[in-house]
Amino acid sequence: MTAPHPLPYPVIAAAAAVLALFALLRFFVRLRRDRLVADTPAVRIRSAAQGYVKVTGRAVPAGPDATAAPLSSRPCVWWAYEIAQEQRDSKGNAHWHTVESAASVELFALVDDDGARCLVGPVTAEITPTVRNVWYGATARPAGRPPQSNPLLHSGGWRYTERLLGVGERLCVMGELRSHSELGDVNAGAAAKLHEWKQDQRSLLGRFDLDHDGKLDAAEWEAARLAAARESQTQTLQSAISRESVISEPANGEPFLIAPLSASQLERREQLFAGLYFLLGLIGVIVCAWALGHAALS
């Protein structure tokens, strides 16, 4: 009878040490973020000073009509979607390959309990959606809205994922408040900028073709679209027509958060994430010490 193979304790110790280091680094990042979220008081929009703020209110369209989500046509103030195709490798293993993804760059309004409003520019924000749906189909584009209930087994070689912020949802937003001019159509501005960039293919590829294969893949094109959206939003915000307050990406690296939570719920969420990273790091340290002890005895 052969003796059982001993566990690879040095390998286990190394893996646990890497996990502990990663988790503890993330814990300190989250702890700093948690302190910033907790130490930034929620303010009324009307009395908010320019700078980094935390405000709550209901999300409404910036213009007369709500935005229509591209996959389901549902009304919303913000959307993001991903379309993936099921593919199989040479061994027959299935995996999902993203063929298309995009996110809304259109500004929406936040109205607080006093009736005061400000605009929110969602580009680069960390957004927690109010609706997230995943459904499947046989074509590259869905035939309609997602089903009311998700089946246990999917049918079809295409997967559609859609995330939305619904009209009228109560949100907490943390970002940099600035007083800017009246905003035009950011989507149209981004599209125009992309069209301008495509006239100079050499510069476009030099800027966004990261793997230098002479073309832009889906991820590189998405990076170009986001860059165009940022530049368009910046140019629009700097126009000088009429003044309006806008919350957008902070200039000094503070978190830009949009979540369907109250201010206190957002603080508790950040504390929970910090605690989970600390616990994961502690488990990694314990496992590393256990594996090193057994490695020394073997």
Image (spheres, grey):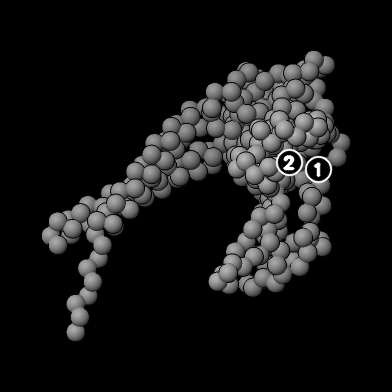
**Quick one: 263 or 1, which is closer to the camera?**
1
Residue 127 location (% of width, % of height): 62, 41
**Quick one: 22 or 129, which is closer to the camera?**
22
In the depicted structure, whether residue 29 falls above or below residue 51: below
Rendered image: mark on residue 18: none
Q: Quadrant of residue 24?
A: top left
Residue under the image location 34 percent in, 43 percent down: 21
Which residue reaches farthest top?
240
Sequence-wise, which precedes: disc 1 or disc 2? 1
Residue under the image location 80 percent in, 22 percent down: 182
Looking at the rendered image, the quarter that the N terminus falls into is bottom left
Element type at mark 2: loop
Residue 284 location (% of width, % of height): 31, 51
Element type at mark 1: strand
Residue under the image location 50 percent in, 43 percent down: 269
Residue, disc 1: 67
Q: Quadrant of residue 116?
A: top right
Q: For label 1, count other residues whose C-alpha is less than 10 Å away and answer few (under 14), some (14-19) or many (20+).
A: many
Q: Quadrant of residue 88?
A: bottom right
Q: For label 2, count other residues whose C-alpha is less than 10 Å away and answer few (under 14), some (14-19) or many (20+).
A: many
Residue, disc 2: 104
Q: Are marks 1 and 2 in contact (CB under 8 Å)?
A: yes
Cα–Cα gap, marks 1 and 2: 9 Å
Disc 2 residue type (three-letter): Ser
Looking at the rendered image, the quarter that the C terminus falls into is bottom left
Q: Is residue 268 left or right of residue 213?
A: left
Disc 1 residue type (three-letter): Thr
Residue 111 location (% of width, % of height): 73, 32
